[in-house]
Image: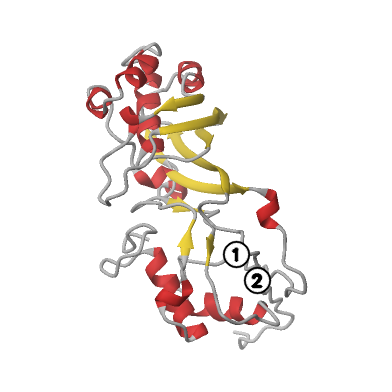
Amino acid sequence: SPSISGWQFQVSPPTIQCIVEKALIQITKLERECLHFVGASRTDTGVHAWGQVAHFITPFNYDSLETIHAALNGLLPSDIRVREISAATPEFHARFSAKSKVYHYKIYNDTIMDPFQRHYVYHSVYQLNTAAMREAAKMLIGKHDFSAFVNASRNDRVPDPVKTIFRFDVIEMGPLIQLEVEGSGFLYRQVRNMVALLIQIGKEAIPTEIVPKILATLDRRELAKYALSAPPHGLCLVSVKYNQEHLLLPSDCPTTSFGRHHTITKCKLPFY
């Protein structure tokens, strides 16, 4: 939503975390400090999330998760939905139990943009060389210091710049090019910066050999000579993969809720 500024908590303008927390506070009657609500990924403004994961803590157990699930989605605005609620063991942590994260960046590579995809896909009128993009993406796979691909973050954290990328695929589906990247974790705007470089390589504005050279500099200013961050709306957090031991359900826990599905058997509206 244009009015929501990413995930990380802030009151104004509101974020996903802030809005979900308010709903949880209303349902559980607990204070924010008691819930310890934490998300797996700090997506920034304009970035979408299909597979965001978060956890919270209550001093009591629920006999059923269906009711709280329905109440939560009933309080949330229409552009935010909780797809699943499950009990968790004390070892589970939405961020620290994660083994990898998968992001997709979509590019519509045609003269005329599909209007139905405009909010979720970046439009490139230039005919991109996907073979060159694929070759460049392979150079980013592996364990590297990605300091050259990180923007300065607004918080005080000094994250470890060494990350491992397990795969970086460039998939063509007609005019749609989908960049799929899976890694142990990502720095602030790292994915959008990598995508921006691949787009420039796809335009054949720069050669693929530039990738290891930029990596080696460990300097964000070097990347800025060739590419700016790709727009956020083409990026989506698709899934978070976890340590399987931390996903084990506690004994005697309520059944996982996947949301209620209603089927309308009779028309409730008068016939005209």
Vertical relation: 16 (above or below) 137: below
Vertical relation: 210 (above or below) 256: above
Query: In whole angstroms, how far apart are the C-alphas of marks 2 and 1?
Result: 6 Å
> Mark number for residue 259?
2
Note whether residue 175 is visible.
no
**Residue at x 24%, y 27% (from the top left corner):** 224
Q: Nearer the viewer, residue 126 or 236?
A: 236
Q: Quadrant of residue 171?
A: top right
**Residue at x 25%, y 68% (from the top left corner):** 12
Which residue position holds label 1? 83
User: For the residue marked with disc 2, what is the amino acid?
Assistant: Gly
| N-term mark: 2 or 1 | 1
Q: Nearer the viewer, residue 127 or 25?
A: 25
Note whether residue 220 is visible.
yes
Q: Position of residue 103 (x, y in %)?
A: 50, 41
Q: Residue furthest front?
A: 91
Vertical relation: 86 (above or below) 139: below
Q: Nearer the viewer, residue 30 or 255?
A: 30
- Contact between labelled residues 1 and 2, with CB atoms less than 8 Å apart: yes
